[in-house]
Image: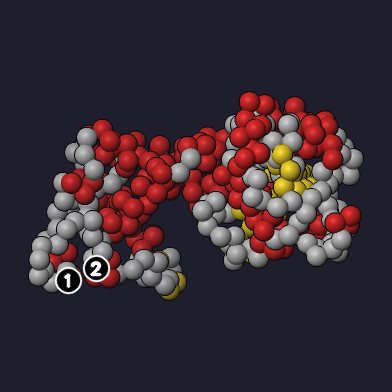
Amino acid sequence: MANVSPDSPVAEQPVIGIIGRGEIGRMYAKHLSATGWKKSHVIQPMYSVIYVCDRKEKYEQLQVDIKDLPGVTVLKNGHLVSRCSDFIMYSVEAEFIDRVVAEYGPSTKVGAFVSGQTSVKDPERQAFEKHLPNDVHIVSIHSLHGPALAPEGQPLCIIQHRAPDSARILVETILAPFKSHYVYLSYEAHDLITANAQAVTHAAFLSMGTAWNCAGYFPWEEGTCVRGIETVKVNIMLRIYCNKWHVYAGLAILNPSAKVQIHQFAQSATALFKLMIEGDEDGLRKRVYRARDIVFDDEYREGIQKKPIILSEKMLDQFSLARKTTGEASTTDDDASTASSNSHLAL
């Protein structure tokens, strides 16, 4: 079966099932249908899957939603998807993955390949190991991009957990039409990398948004966060707040690898706040500048040369959240130095 493709005879193609029809489940159903796989089915369990199904009361609406997707069939529940699919993808929030796999996992077809699309993998791994039969292969996946982006060229994580190489190859074959860039990791490595790259970053930007919300104004209304690096920070903050809550809950709360970073973030914020309360200006400057030097300096640690990791202030000042007056020239480094200073210590 590893040598099959969307051009293979229908009888030779794997049956594809998706349990959970959220935004990622919808994206996969759409792209798998567009690439020509004929045996696709989607089910959305209590919260949201290809055979296709949703909660019982949404069955008719789901049929309407996918009627234009050729080769996709709506089923009434995850049991029907699990018992007849060769490849099953759970597209369920990490918070609910254990409950959903506990309900539908025992119905999984003998020898099937099971994947998950949770943003944090530890709850998924535990659910699969606990509830899936031993004669089922586990090759998990995670598209490391949002559902609004085309998958071509985007990273797609593949986790060969409890499966032979033939199972991994079949999953690669099924997803090959996506033209994504495969990244091979373990469950543990996935969560560690995700935590390092996103957990504290998201916590910091969520803290900024919370601060502006408590202040009762948008950051650009007061004129203090409208230029240079502030434009970048505000836009990242807005992007995070526009996304689904469960993604960030999973990254920061359910990811065991994120606990170290979140704990350090809290410790650092407390230490900075203590320096402020004590009036220790020298200690505060020393700590903050030390962090700046580690991240941004061209030379750090025994003269190792580092390439700049951010655009120059002059370049960034070409973009602004403030309205320029008519005839105003582009900002310069001198102009930028006159802007009101501000701080995002997330305290």
Say above or below: 252 vs 201: above
- Taking the image as drawn, is residue 43 in sight? no
* Contact check, label 2 and label 1, Cβ < 8 Å: yes
The quadrant where residue 322 appears: bottom left
**Left or right: 114 in relation to 119:** right
Residue 133 drawn at (x, y percent): 85, 35
Residue 114: give x, y in percent of width and height.
77, 44
Which residue carries the number 2 mark? Answer: 318
The residue singled out by tag 1 in the image is 330
Numbered disc 1: secondary structure: loop
Between discs 2 and 1, the one toward the N terminus = 2
Q: How many marks?
A: 2
Q: How crowded is mark 1: few (under 14 residues within 10 Å), some or many (20 or more)?
A: few
Residue positioned 62% across, 40% down in the render: 64
Which residue is found at the position 60% from the left and 42% from the top?
65
How much space separates mark 2 and mark 1, taking CA atoms? 7 Å
Residue plotted at (65% across, 56% down): 31
Q: What element carries label 2?
A: loop
Residue 332, by quadrant, is: bottom left
Q: What residue type is labelled 1?
A: Ser
The amino acid type, in three-letter code, at marker 2 is Gln
Residue 172 point in image, percent of width and height = 75, 59
